[in-house]
């Protein structure tokens, strides 16, 4: 069985929001990966920058508060994880 290939973290058609959140995650050395053209994943957090919505794995309800709330939740999780 071959290992599933990961998507590149950035692409030329990224929105400014996507570029900003990828740069922020990278600057904090967060474990980030690209799930789709419109979604990134950091740990158990899923984020859609263009829609400014996010959720946690196994939690279908999207969270409010946009990018700021996503950043706050991720930083809290990361500070507890390291």
Image (cartoon, rainbow, N blue to C red):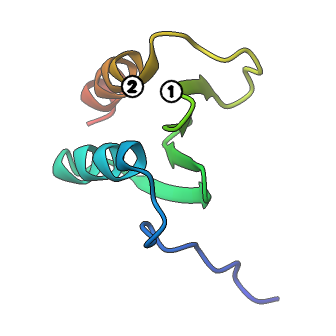
Q: Residue furthest top?
A: 64
Label 2: few (<14), some or many (≥20) within 10 Å?
many
Q: Residue at x 30, y 24 (%)?
A: 80
Viewed as shown, does residue 3 lie left or right of 18? right
**In this view, 45 is above or below 18:** above
Q: Which residue is mark 1?
A: 52
Q: Residue furthest bottom?
A: 2
Viewer-proximal residue among 32 and 81: 32
Quadrant position of the N terminus in the picture = bottom right
Q: Position of residue 42 (x, y in %)?
A: 46, 43
Q: Position of residue 32 (x, y in %)?
A: 42, 53
**In this view, 63 is above or below 39:** above
Q: Callout 1: helix, strand or loop?
A: loop
Viewer-proximal residue among 10 and 56: 10
How many numbered discs? Answer: 2
Tell me the CA gap for discs 2 and 1: 6 Å
User: Sequence order check: which comes first, mark 2 or mark 1?
Assistant: 1
Q: Residue at x 33, y 19 (%)?
A: 68
Viewer-proximal residue among 8 and 56: 8
Viewed as shown, does residue 1 lie left or right of 28? right
Q: Which residue is mark 2?
A: 67
Viewed as shown, does residue 25 lie left or right of 55? left
CB under 8 Å between discs 2 and 1: yes
Q: Which mark is residue 68?
A: none
Q: Position of residue 2 (x, y in %)?
A: 76, 89
């Amino acid at each position: 069985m071959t290992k599933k290939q990961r998507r590149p973290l950035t692409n030329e058609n990224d929105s400014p929001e996507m570029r900003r959140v990828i740069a922020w995650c990278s600057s904090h050395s967060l474990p980030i990966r690209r799930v789709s053209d419109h979604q990134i994943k950091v740990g158990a957090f899923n984020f859609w920058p263009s829609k400014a919505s996010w959720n946690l794995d196994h939690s279908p309800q999207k969270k409010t508060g946009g990018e700021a709330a996503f950043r706050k939740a991720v930083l809290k999780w990361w500070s507890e994880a390291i």
